[in-house]
Image (cartoon, rainbow, N blue to C red):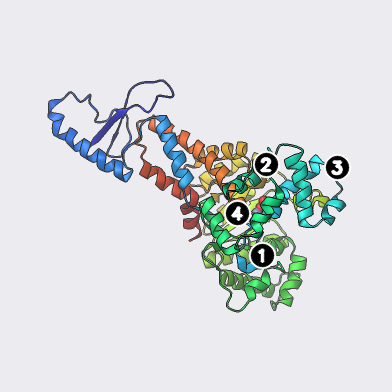
Amino acid sequence: MYAVCAPAAAEESGVAGVSCAVSGVGGAGDGCGDGGDASAGSEKTEVVAMTSEMRQSGAEPLRGRAAIREAVERIVGEARVVDMHTHLYPEAFGKLLLYGFDALVTYHYLIAEYFRATRASYESFWSRDRAGQADAIWQALFVERSPISEAARGVLTALQALGLDTTDGKPADFRAHFRSVDVGAHIERVFDAAGVDEVVMTNDPFDDAERPVWMEEGFALTSRFRAALRIDPLLLDWSSSCGRLRVWGYNADALLSETALSEVRRFLDDWIYRTKALYMAVSLPPTWAYPEESPSATLLERCVLPVAQDHGIPFALMIGVQRTVNPGLRLAGDGVGRADVRAVERLCIRHPDVRFMVTMLARENQHELCVAARKLPNLLPFGCWWFLNNPSLIEEITRMRLELLGLTVVPQHSDARVLEQVIYKWKHSRALIGEVLGRKYADLAATGWAVTESAIRSDVERLFSRNFLEFVQ
Ligand code: RAT
Ligand code: ZN
């Protein structure tokens, strides 16, 4: 056993002292003397030797709040990400892959902001082509005002990271840049700039643009993109989905007979095999209840959960979206509502053998969701979703999760719809997560615990990839 004694990691609080860690076990004061004991000579040599070895391996305890926070922020900045929920696609999906200036500026988050800033009519905006819409948004949100909202700043973060000059942003220059890129190489460049290894797509078998790509003979995914089977139409609109399943050769009926239920399971099996989906997912309104008497609940109970269990994959629930609050805004017209966390608890309790990944859209639901997860090992809270993906809320939610759940969460996903958005979403989130984590490790060191770079690296890897990968395996 050896001991390392260090000045207390307390310069920010102004408290002087000595903190010790013994063989990686915390406990201030344990085994630490003042070094005045002659018999400790050989032990001291051993300590010095171990320390230089430890320094090289990152096992040396970090000293001082500032050094700890700097190390954490650096490690978080370097962490490789598996982005567990996006709306991105590889090149093979053609027009479904959105990238470039016009796609960035016409992000639906910015469309909503545009209509607040102007008196434009919905008709005149939607009648423009995408470049025309981007010009109108650029003029209103980037020229006539400073682009300080999170979504507006994000465009600039992404452009800047790609080496474009944002000081005097000129749409024509930005467009020229994206016209000149080779798409495959550009995808790699963006992933590298974002520090993202893999993204999980949102794959909807009911989407007429997407379905045929999966059905193509010999179609195979590239390594950066993984699938997730999104089944909103199946669970939320059975009367239409039932007809479509019939057209595709599944013997479904509106009344959900035993045959229909078994055919829905066959449909899900087929798509999980076809896409190699890592999980199934649905987004749900704030009024979602469980259990309940409805086609949706029957399909969930009798089809989705047994199939998830058979395939050993989780089911993701994204709860709290109020669809089409303002139809004039189209995709930008959705809102948020507070949902019932009791429903999530009941679902997880009734199905201990199914793993659930849950994100909730209302800020008001975040604390209850954390408390529920403390009781339910098969529940993994993830991401700061959509209207929560803002610095003030990411900081608050991440801090709350770390305090209540330690390192057993997935703190963020990007929800990127446009390729380059992964750059800004991860750059902004990394900075916030790094700050929050840095304070946590500094507080930890103040207890005498040995906070080392290698331990931080391992923890950060859990947060940015391993927790998710282990949960889906
Ligand atoms: O964040 C978004 O872009 C939303 O429009 C939705 O895509 C949401 O994330 C979802 O997956 O339903
Ligand atoms: Zn999404």
Label 1: which residue? 204
Residue depth check, mark 3 versus mark 2: number of the one nearer the observer: 2
Distance from Cα at disc 3 to Cα at disc 4: 45 Å
Q: x%, y% of residue 47?
A: 21, 36
Residue at screen point 70% across, 79% down: 249
Amino acid type of disc 3? Arg
Label 2: which residue? 168
Residue depth check, mark 1 versus mark 3: number of the one nearer the observer: 3
Ligand 2 is in which quadrant of the figure? bottom right
Residue 335: tell me if it is visible.
Answer: no
Task: Please tell me which of labels 3 and 2 falls first in the chain.
Answer: 3
Amino acid type of disc 4? Leu
Extreme-left residue of the structure: 39
Q: Is residue 233 left or right of residue 59?
A: right
Residue depth check, mark 2 versus mark 1: number of the one nearer the observer: 2
Residue at screen point 41% across, 35% down: 68
Q: Residues within 10 Å of mark 1 (few under 14, many from 20)?
A: many
- SS of the residue at dot 3? loop
> As rendered, which of 291 and 154 lies closer to the eye?
154
> As rendered, which of 281 and 119 lies closer to the eye?
119
